[in-house]
Amino acid sequence: MRYDAAARQRRGLPARPRPGSPSRAAREAVLERDGWCCQRCGRALAGAAYSLQHRLPRGRAGGNAPANLVLVCGSATTPGGCHNWIEHQDRRAATREGWLVPSGIAPEDWPVRRHDDWALPGETRWAPCLPHPLQVDPESRWAA
Ligand SMILES: [Zn+2]
């Protein structure tokens, strides 16, 4: 049967994920790990717009592993939320803070500055850690 998004919506079925998107199980695991709150601003997201941010973009071979996905408010394409800020407002700051991962570095090696502490997104929890040296070295291109 042909895929019909409108028909799925009329029948109350969730939209089918785009090819290459996280599986439903992977999405649910990230939502659970992140407590249904935006990991950047802390906003509760039940009933609000949210999306999963790929820290290393899919276009640069970023996959759907838990270390590469964080729950943020809004979407990449609509203004006003953290996902849009990360993608379009200040990519350098977003990279320094770990919401984006620079080329040549694995997401597992590039922590996120979250709730004023550095941590890595794991499978079921965030693991506190030290920042990558390039995230704090004033000589680095990612420094403030
Ligand atoms: Zn937010």
Image: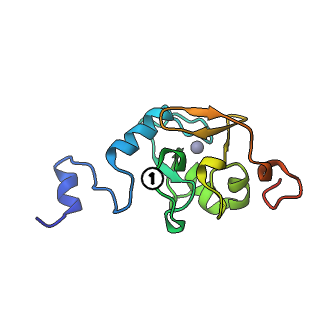
| Position in image of residue 102 (x %, y %) | 67, 61
Residue found farthest to the left: 1
Determine the residue positioned at 17% across, 58% down.
Answer: 7
Relative to 24, 3 lies left or right: left
Residue for badge 1: 64
Vertical comparison of 60 with 95: above or below: below
| Position in image of residue 75 (x %, y %) | 49, 54
At label 1, the amino acid type is Asn
The coloring applied to the image is: rainbow
Residue 36 visible: no
| Position in image of residue 21 (x %, y %) | 38, 57
Relative to 109, 77 lies left or right: left
| Position in image of residue 19 (x %, y %) | 34, 63
Nearer-the-camera pick, 134 or 8: 134
Is the distance from the Cβ of mark 1 to the nearest ligand 1 atom less than 8 Å?
Answer: no
Nearer-the-camera pick, 85 or 56: 56
Determine the residue positioned at 73% across, 53% down.
Answer: 96
Determine the residue positioned at 39% across, 44% down.
Answer: 27
